[in-house]
Image (cartoon, rainbow, N blue to C red):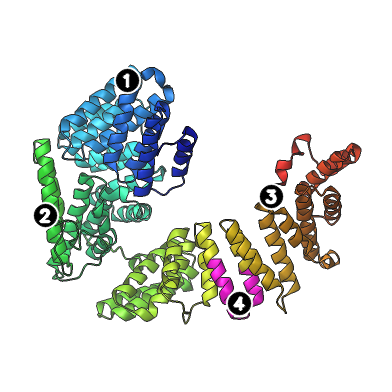
């Protein structure tokens, strides 16, 4: 189907609102094809260059290489068509391609070296620093085992000035730290990397903290390693792009004697292997997983079942998995080991040496470094035991340890829940979030269905307090969507639905849960709460049909006997604001007019509400062209001391000028400190 240029550009704009994933990838590729068909070369370049970034950052490296290759060829064919911005995009994204290409064993190593040569040629031609070129030469040399060359490139890079094509202040030290770790220079790696732990970009600080884990452990700084682990994992756990870095965290668990924590991470993230970002990242994570699983096997837990939603582990990946039947620690370890060795052989054949095979085998065979380091938050949450609550937390922690040692898992899980509550009450939100996750995992692992609602509620509260609304919503959503009933010991169900609605990230989800809560309140005969949640649902209504349905429900609720007058006034005013913002001025005016005039003589708060209603009425009547009614409402609102007096004064000035009362309009401007640039209808939009 042919498209016009305007339609294609709109399709491209639409892709920016899509979440990353196969649907967005396909949409971007479709836009590029349409642009090609229309001969929009510069636009097609921009689309593909943007696509390169999207693909690279979301696990589609092969697609990124294809899109970038098109852009490079188009630029070289007709460089006169493109400006400096296009050249900079090409040079910047070239770094990502070089970073990716050596991680695919099916791509000849010469391809990476050719790209490096091309990169250096272009950078020199443009008069740019070779800082980024040396960085990527070093990364590739380190990856293929040419450690002396990696050292030389690192040292040259350290002497070369950065420029606008260099990576950011967090990513450069991360790359350098990786090279120094490979060279066995741990102290220097820490000195270079540690200052970057406060940096922020899409890869930071999770990348640098991950790279520092092993140097910290090998230099006798386990508690710094623990802090780096917690900081990094909270940021990378939702980003499959960081598959290789997650492997470093698995090795951290192995080295610190925490195979249980490692096993939990394997179960959580094994499905990332269904679509690994690159084969090298796949090998890194899989090898680290083998190290975790092997440790459990050595403890006699080879028959332990593995809970994972990955198709690979369930033997559904076209013959690469373990076959049908339950997946155990031993069977998964064997399958992953085989997978790693196949990848290692492919890399070694491509690289012409045994470096990757040796590195990956060492990783799979790794064990503890030094004394065990407790990672469970219940072992580390007691360092501030100077007040009664902290002492209660310490007592609960001791109970968890004692009950776990005695083999009483259910009682230990309940103690974990109680400790989580205490951490929340003590405002130790990060610790509470970790404790809640650990408690919820134990409740789920032990099948303690009776405690699952409490665990989910605590998980919700902890993540919300810790500033993680997405995880908070997921915890409570899972609880509410599992049943239609209530939960003993928790707030009433409509209250839970309200809490979830506030944390949802999309208007449609907020609308859904507020509306559900309002109907549950209606079933309980609580009209006031029904009205309140209906108004919240109206604020989140996504589209005219949903808003129309909501206003109809509000009208019905307002007509019921026994409705509190103040609650009704608030509801009418808030609905009026929603209607006004969405351009429904007639309906907004009707709701605003219904706010009782008796409020004008009531207490100050009610007087303000009346003034606000009149302010909204004045703006609505103005938009409807009903100038006399608008002017009357504006004057009355200003006389009552409206909180919205600035906007109302603007409306009144516009109204006065429209009927030629310029002198009075000037007086209103002086009284309300308005400048000429303030007198604009656009200021009446809200």
> Would you place residue 545 above or below residue 668 in this image?
below
Give coordinates of residue 111: x percent, y percent: 19, 30
How many numbered discs?
4
The earlier-in-sequence mark between 2 and 4 is: 2
Task: Please name the predominant secondary structure of the magenta segment in the image.
Answer: helix
Q: Nearer the viewer, mark 2 or mark 3?
A: 3
Residue 338, numbered circle: 2
| Tag shown at residue 522 | 4
Q: Earlier in the sequence, mark 4 or mark 3?
A: 4
Q: Nearer the viewer, residue 271 or 595?
A: 595
Which element is circle 2 on? Answer: helix
Residue 600, image quadrant: bottom right
Nearer to us: label 2 or label 4: 4
User: Which residue is label 3 attached to?
Assistant: 686
| Sequence-first disc among 3 and 1 | 1
Looking at the rendering, the stretch of residues picked out in magenta corresponds to 513-533
Query: Is residue 420 shown left or right of residue 641?
Result: left
> Does the magenta run of residues contain 518?
yes
Callout 1–callout 4 Cβ contact below 8 Å = no
Magenta stretch encompasses residue 74: no
In contact (CB < 8 Å): disc 3 and disc 1: no
Q: Is residue 245 above or below residue 351?
A: below
Residue 278 pos. (x, y %)? 24, 45
Q: Residue at (48%, 38%) from the top-left corner?
A: 7
Q: Element type at marker 1?
A: helix
Q: Could you say which quadrant of the image residue 304 lies in?
A: bottom left
Point out residue 612 in the picture as x, y percentages from the top left corner.
76, 57
* Residue 440 visible in this rendered orientation of the protein: yes
Alpha carbon distance from label 4 to label 3: 31 Å
């Amino acid at each position: 189907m042919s498209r016009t240029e305007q339609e294609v550009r709109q399709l491209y704009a639409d892709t920016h609102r899509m979440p990353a994933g196969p649907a967005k990838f396909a949409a971007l590729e479709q836009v590029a094809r349409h642009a090609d068909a229309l001969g929009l070369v510069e636009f097609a370049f921009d689309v593909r260059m943007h696509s390169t970034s999207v693909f690279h950052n979301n696990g589609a490296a092969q697609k990124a290489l294809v899109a970038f290759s098109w852009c490079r060829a188009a630029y070289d064919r007709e460089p006169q068509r493109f400006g400096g911005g296009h050249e900079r995009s090409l040079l910047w994204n070239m770094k990502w391609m070089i970073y990716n290409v050596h991680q695919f064993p099916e791509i000849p190593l010469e391809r990476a070296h050719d790209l490096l040569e091309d990169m250096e040629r272009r950078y020199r031609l443009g008069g740019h620093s070779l800082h980024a070129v040396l960085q990527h030469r070093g990364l590739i040399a380190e990856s293929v085992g040419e450690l002396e060359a990696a050292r030389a490139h690192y040292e040259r890079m350290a002497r070369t000035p950065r420029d606008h094509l260099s990576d950011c202040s967090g990513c450069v030290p991360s790359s350098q730290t990786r090279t120094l770790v490979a060279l066995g220079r741990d102290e220097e790696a820490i000195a270079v990397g540690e200052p970057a732990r406060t940096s922020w970009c899409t890869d930071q600080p999770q990348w640098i903290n991950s790279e520092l884990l092993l140097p910290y452990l090998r230099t006798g700084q386990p508690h710094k390693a623990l802090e780096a682990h917690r900081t990094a994992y909270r940021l990378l756990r939702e980003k499959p792009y960081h598959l290789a870095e997650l492997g470093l965290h698995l090795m951290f668990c192995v080295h610190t004697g925490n195979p249980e924590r490692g096993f939990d991470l394997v179960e959580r993230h094994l499905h990332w292997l269904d679509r690994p970002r690159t084969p090298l990242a796949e090998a890194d994570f899989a090898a680290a997983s083998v190290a975790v699983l092997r440790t459990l096997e050595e403890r006699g837990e080879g028959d332990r079942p593995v809970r994972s939603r990955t198709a690979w582990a369930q033997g559904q990946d076209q013959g690469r998995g373990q076959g049908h039947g339950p997946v155990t620690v031993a069977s998964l370890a064997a399958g992953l080991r085989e997978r790693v060795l196949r990848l290692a052989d492919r890399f070694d054949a491509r690289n012409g040496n045994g470096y990757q095979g040796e590195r990956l085998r060492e990783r799979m065979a790794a064990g503890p470094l030094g004394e065990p380091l407790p990672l469970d938050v219940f072992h580390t949450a007691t360092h501030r035991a100077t007040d009664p609550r902290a002492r209660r937390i310490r007592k609960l922690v001791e109970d968890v340890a004692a009950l776990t040692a005695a083999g009483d898992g259910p009682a230990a899980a309940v103690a974990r829940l109680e400790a989580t509550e205490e951490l929340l009450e003590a405002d130790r939100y990060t610790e509470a979030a970790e404790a809640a996750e650990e408690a919820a995992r134990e409740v789920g692992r032990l099948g303690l269905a009776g405690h699952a609602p409490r665990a989910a509620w605590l998980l919700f509260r902890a993540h919300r307090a810790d500033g993680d609304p997405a995880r908070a919503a997921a915890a409570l959503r899972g609880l509410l969507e599992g049943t239609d009933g209530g939960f003993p010991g928790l707030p009433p169900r409509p209250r839970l639905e309200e809490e979830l609605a506030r944390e949802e990230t999309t208007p449609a989800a907020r609308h859904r849960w507020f509306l559900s809560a309002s109907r549950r309140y209606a079933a309980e005969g609580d009209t006031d709460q029904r009205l309140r949640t209906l108004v919240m649902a109206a604020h989140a209504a996504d589209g005219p049909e949903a808003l129309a349905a909501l206003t109809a429900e509000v009208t019905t609720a307002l007509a019921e006997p026994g409705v509190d007058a103040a609650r009704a006034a608030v509801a009418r005013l808030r609905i009026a604001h929603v209607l006004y913002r969405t351009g429904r001025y007639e309906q907004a005016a009707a709701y605003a007019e219904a706010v009782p005039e008796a409020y004008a003589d009531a207490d100050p708060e009610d007087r303000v509400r009346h003034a606000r209603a009149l302010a909204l009425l004045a703006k609505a009547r103005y938009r409807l062209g009903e100038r006399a009614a608008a002017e009357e409402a504006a004057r009355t609102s200003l006389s009552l001391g409206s909180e919205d007096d600035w906007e109302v004064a603007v409306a009144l000035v516009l109204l006065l000028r429209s009927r030629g009362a310029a002198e009075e309009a000037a007086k209103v401007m002086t009284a309300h400190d308005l400048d000429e640039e303030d007198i604009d209808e656009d200021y009446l939009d809200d």
